[in-house]
Amino acid sequence: MLAAALVTAAALAAAPAGLLAHRAVRRARGAAALHIASPAGIDEQGFVRIGGIDQWISVRGEDRTNPVIVEIHGGPGAPNSIHTTRTRAWERHFTIVRWDMRGAGKTFGRGGPQGQGETTFDRLYEDALEVTRHAIERLRTDRVVLVANSYGSVFGLRLARNHPELYSAYVGTDQNIQSGGRDTTAHEGLLERLRAAGSTKRLAQVEAIGPDAHAWTPAQRATYAKLSAQSDPLTLDTIKKVVLGSMWLSPLHSLRDLRDFFRGQSFSERVTEGTAGLDDRADGTRFQIPFFIFQGELDVLTPTASARAFFEEVEAPVKHFAVIEGASHFASFRRPERFLELLLTHVRPAVAGAGRAARSAP
């Protein structure tokens, strides 16, 4: 929803010939960088039947005996697959499973709006479990590390809490905390930024939406997210340079795929109806697996203070909170080297021996 607020599929298609030529060169360079030559490596992209429809899944890594990460992307409707070149170094230490959710990206492009079936929070939650089990079976492991970012972390907390048999650790970034309407920190911060900027029209829009997220329609949620992003220079810069830049240069995405990315984001707004009444504290702060939050130091969309306050209440066998310095939202992709450092320093030791391949190789 945030990227779609800044650019349209039509604008991409109308790019001048010189820009398209530059894109072709950069994409070819990116494709070469993504090549995995290791005999122990894996590089698979394609459609898998999940929840009754074909859904796009990527599995990449240089050593299949490395810990497996299953990502739950945000948005809703904003796949992480566009960031594959930015996170290439992660694949030396982990096998990364990325999935375009029902209604998002290449999955949306495959079936179109009529081919997505039931597109609700509960249905996507069940899909996530099925994707996890697919990854476990495909990679001959017992459990996987769950990495969830932004809206995907709403799913992530519930998956980690309810299914410790599937996950060896939980890592949240751009961590979204559902508070049952009690925490209005982000809303108050947005009002403050708009007043300081003298943005009276946008201020009136936010005031009309109100602080009670329970009462928002999907369209109001999308508007609120757009205004939040546009009000913060660092977030806006990240969307332009990191999100849109990754999208434009991704060797895994054609111009048609980029069109489907934006269409999928608009289509997926409906998913937020399923989270209006959620309350993470009421659902429980006890986790049976190692629990980590790596949050952008300056995140205004999912405020770092709110994520830290929730983290302090968490009970887990191992837990750690860290900030990603100089980053706002999309912190793991703005500073992928810092995120990898945190994974290697804190997560990998916590899961050592857990979930490693115990079955015969495929």
Image (cartoon, grey):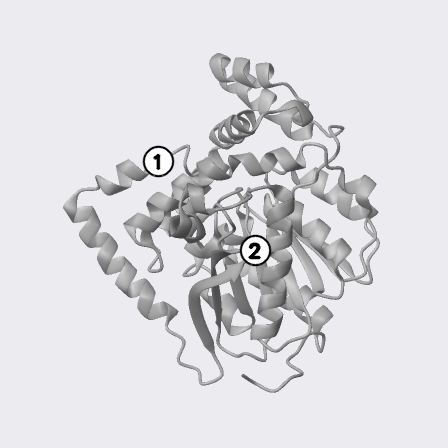
Please determine whether, in this image, residue 122 is positioned above or below residue 361.
Answer: above
Q: Which amino acid, mark 2? A: Gly
Q: Position of residue 121 (x, y in %)?
A: 62, 43
Q: Residue furthest left?
A: 17
Q: What element does badge 2 sit on? A: loop
Q: What element does badge 1 sit on? A: loop
Please determine whether, in this image, residue 315 is positioned above or below residue 178.
Answer: below
Q: Position of residue 5 (x, y in %)?
A: 42, 32
Q: Which labelled disc corresponds to residue 234? A: none
Q: Which residue is mark 2?
A: 51
Q: Position of residue 143 (x, y in %)?
A: 68, 70
Is residue 161 found left or right of 78 in the rendered image?
right
The structure residue drawn at horizontal position 16% and vertical position 48%, both measured from the top left corner, is 18
Q: Which quadrant does the C terminus fall into?
A: bottom right
Q: Nearer the viewer, residue 347 or 165?
A: 165
Cα separation, mark 1 vs mark 2, equals 31 Å
Is residue 190 found left or right of 110 in the rendered image?
right
The structure residue drawn at horizontal position 76% and vertical position 55%, both measured from the top left corner, is 162
Is residue 338 found left or right of 156 in the rendered image?
left
Label 2 crowding class (10 Å Cα cut-off): few <14, some 14-19, many 20+?
some
Q: Which amino acid, mark 1? A: Val
Q: Is residue 324 visible?
A: no
Q: Nearer the viewer, residue 53 or 173?
A: 53
Q: Position of residue 360 (x, y in %)?
A: 61, 87
Q: Which labelled disc corresponds to residue 7? A: 1
Q: Comparing marks 1 and 2, which lies closer to the viewer? A: 2
Q: Nearer the viewer, residue 306 or 66?
A: 66
Q: Nearer the viewer, residue 62 or 260?
A: 260
Q: Is residue 66 visible?
A: yes
The structure residue drawn at horizontal position 49% and vertical position 63%, both measured from the top left corner, is 48
